Image (cartoon, helix red, strand yellow):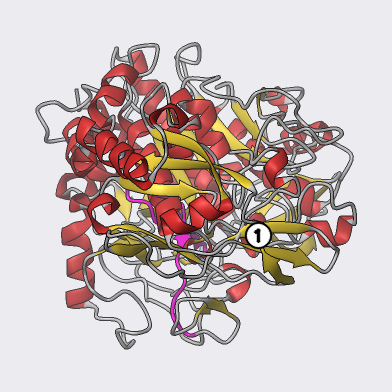
């Protein structure tokens, strides 16, 4: 949502309780996730300032989302594979008349004339232009102007309230608590601006990409004898029994997500192909530009090219000759977020609950010089059958409402029937590289705030959403071979894992999580992690994430991270999809319900050694069965393929 000229400095604001003025019993609806750094409150927002208020209406049937997804994704379901059309999904989840009327009645009772209220075409939100005075009284809050040391201003509120009888009908209200911690786009100091950029900008978080130990590879390995020191495509084929040449490449689709300014270099791809897949020299992905996304070449370094080079090189090599879709999100001025990516996959998401959030998302059209000055990219591409994303952020860095809105959309994308009449999408997210800690090793304080001195575990997002598949990292132990058991990755990075503080335990995972907590109780107090036994556990599975030989900036060097694990897992699922499509079936879609069943357990290598340190602890231990370090283990494609082929 663009706050237009009213919020000329990319406005947002801080809310403090005001006294009740009407008969309603107000309750706090939302609080800001993090207090802003380097911004100081300087004055109350002018009472006559006009704010474009948007009220996101609660969708109906959301409680059935997991049930519906299980019905089309669980291998034992009689309706496996019978996915829904986009229209069916919209109709199922549209807000009820009761919800729409409840919010309208509240606003009109407050004093807004009916003609001031506007309902979106998809009926997902109500908009009204209100003065600051009206908004403060309506939401029992105060708006303040915050000023950065550079002089840039924005507005926001610390919390806001709604009548108790309305709360269940409203998901989110904007502009309110959502504070843009990054600087506005017209701040020109490049080094300082970098601290506030979005997902693709290096330096803002250890989540921004893979890691390197700086080791250069002078001679590419020619056999499997050095896989404990240098991982190559052949090492992965041996580790995970990958043995298939795609034949349904005209129907199958595999998407790799990247966020500007992260970008691949063509010469790097060819350097890698020349050493490991000579027939692919000259091969390039099909660029799907989302909100002005571009494979820029101006900034070149490991921080700018390492992620994209890694993802594309290994995905291409393992699925040759499968074409790849490069889902490049965000222009060079503003960048993008996961919501911008989802906008491109589902047009209705662009306006759902008021649209994108300026605190976290790119807002388009971008009127700044050099920006993407066109409407946001809504529904420009059908969801690929597999989408691999090696980016993430701390769950604590977003609000609960923001995370829930996004997670619901992942669930919808998973069970949508595509334009080809096939099944849903497998959405993969890497689980993070800091063990049980968040980006840069930050943990949570007793107040739930991120802190360098915090001791409470800090899980990742979006991987904590139960409708995506989380991918952790393993390693070939030093001195071991590809025929020996792997362990959790403990070189340079630690496999991200733990338990969500936002999302409940999904039914497909309930037995596995209960078994872990019962049979291998973690030696931590309940205050250190979500030990309720009712929380989503992550990751779901793993793949190797250490010592990858990657072509970056004209050299081969070693790369580490769950950034490696996700595209490799995506490649394996893409090859399985190829076999199913060739057999006249559809792609596997949401795989979580299947991989947790007893019949699939033998198709994974159980990882039982290693841990994921963080927050001053050794973290969780990898152990027999599912664990919050490596999930159900690493895939054995030869064993997985017949299991998935046997499904309808």
Regarding mark 1 in the picture, which secondary structure is present there? loop
Is the N terminus in the top left, top right, bottom left or bottom right quadrant?
top right
Q: Give the residues in magenta.
A: 455-476
Res 55 → quadrant: top left
Image point (38%, 63%), residue name? 21
Q: Nearer the viewer, residue 606 or 518?
A: 518
Q: Which residue is at a point 86% across and 64% down the rendered structure image?
A: 150
Quarter of the image for residue 263 reads top right
Q: Residue at x 69, y 46 (%)?
A: 7
Query: In the figure, is residue 534 to the left or right of 524?
Result: left
**Residue 464 within the magenta-colored segment of the rendering:** yes
Instruction: Locate residue 212, reporting x and y percent.
Output: 72, 61
Name the residue that disc number 1 marks: 45
* Whole-percent x, y for residue 628 in the image: 36, 66
Residue 441 visible in rendering: yes
Q: Is residue 309 left or right of residue 175?
A: right
Q: Residues within 10 Å of mark 1 (few under 14, many from 20)?
A: some
Residue 615: x and y in percent read 50, 82
Give me the residue at 70% from left, 29% from top.
Answer: 365
- In the depicted structure, whether residue 126 falls above or below residue 610: above
């Amino acid at each position: 949502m663009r706050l237009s000229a009213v919020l000329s400095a990319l406005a947002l604001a801080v809310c403090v309780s005001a006294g009740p003025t009407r008969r309603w019993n107000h309750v706090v609806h939302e609080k800001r996730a993090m207090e802003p750094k380097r911004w100081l409150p300087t004055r109350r927002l002018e009472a006559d300032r006009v704010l474009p208020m948007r009220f996101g209406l609660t969708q109906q049937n959301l409680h059935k989302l997991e049930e519906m997804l299980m019905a089309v994704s669980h291998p034992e379901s009689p309706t496996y594979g019978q996915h829904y059309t986009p229209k069916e999904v919209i109709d199922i989840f549209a807000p009820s008349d009761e919800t729409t009327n409840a919010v309208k009645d509240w606003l009109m009772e407050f004093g807004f004339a009916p003609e001031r209220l506007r309902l979106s075409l998809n009926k997902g939100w109500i908009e009204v232009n209100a003065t600051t005075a009206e908004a403060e009284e309506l939401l029992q809050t105060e708006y303040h102007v915050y000023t950065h040391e550079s002089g840039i201003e924005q507005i926001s509120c610390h919390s806001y309230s709604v009548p108790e009888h309305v709360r269940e009908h409203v998901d989110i209200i904007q502009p309110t608590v959502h504070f843009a911690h990054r600087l506005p786009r017209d701040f020109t100091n490049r080094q300082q601006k970098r601290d506030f950029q979005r997902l693709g900008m290096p330096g803002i978080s250890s989540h921004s990409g893979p890691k390197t130990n700086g080791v250069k590879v002078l001679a590419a390995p020619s056999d499997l004898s050095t896989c404990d020191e240098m991982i190559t495509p052949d090492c992965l084929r041996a580790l995970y029994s990958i043995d298939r040449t795609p034949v349904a490449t005209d129907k199958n689709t595999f998407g790799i997500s990247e966020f500007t300014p992260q970008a691949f270099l063509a010469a790097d791809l060819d350097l890698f192909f020349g050493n490991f897949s000579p027939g692919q020299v000259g091969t390039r992905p099909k660029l799907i530009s989302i909100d002005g996304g571009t494979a820029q070449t101006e900034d070149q370094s490991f921080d700018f090219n390492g992620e994209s080079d890694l993802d594309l090189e290994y995905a291409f090599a393992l699925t040759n000759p499968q074409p790849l879709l490069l889902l490049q999100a965000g222009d060079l001025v503003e960048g993008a977020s996961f919501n911008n990516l989802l906008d491109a996959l589902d047009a209705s998401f662009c306006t759902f609950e008021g649209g994108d959030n300026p605190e976290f998302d790119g807002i388009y059209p971008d009127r700044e010089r050099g920006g993407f000055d066109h409407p946001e990219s809504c529904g420009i591409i059908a969801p690929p059958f597999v989408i691999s994303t090696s980016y993430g952020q701390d769950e604590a860095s977003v609000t609960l409402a923001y995370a829930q809105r996004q997670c619901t959309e992942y669930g919808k994308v998973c069970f949508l029937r595509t334009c080809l009449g096939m099944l849903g999408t497998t959405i993969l997210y890497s689980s993070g590289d800091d063990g049980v800690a968040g980006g840069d090793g930050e943990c949570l304080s007793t107040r739930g705030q991120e802190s360098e001195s915090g001791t409470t575990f800090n899980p990742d997002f979006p991987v904590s959403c139960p409708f995506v598949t989380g991918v952790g990292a393993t390693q070939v132990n030093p001195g071991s071979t590809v025929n020996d058991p792997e362990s959790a990755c403990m070189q340079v990075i630690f496999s991200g894992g733990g338990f969500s503080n936002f999302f409940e335990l999904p039914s497909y995972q309930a037995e596995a999580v209960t078994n872990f907590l019962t049979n291998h109780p973690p030696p931590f107090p309940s205050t250190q992690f979500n030990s309720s036994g009712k929380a989503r556990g992550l990751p779901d599975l793993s793949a190797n994430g250490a010592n990858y030989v990657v072509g970056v900036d004209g050299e081969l060097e070693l790369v580490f991270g769950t950034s490696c694990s996700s595209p490799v897992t995506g490649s394996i699922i893409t090859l399985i999809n190829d076999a199913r499509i060739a057999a006249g079936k559809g792609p596997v879609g949401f795989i979580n319900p299947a991989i947790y069943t007893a019949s699939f357990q033998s198709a994974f290598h159980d990882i039982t050694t290693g841990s994921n340190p963080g927050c001053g602890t050794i973290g969780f231990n990898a152990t027999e069965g599912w664990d919050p370090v490596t999930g159900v283990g690493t895939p054995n494609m030869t064993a997985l393929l017949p299991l998935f082929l046997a499904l309808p």
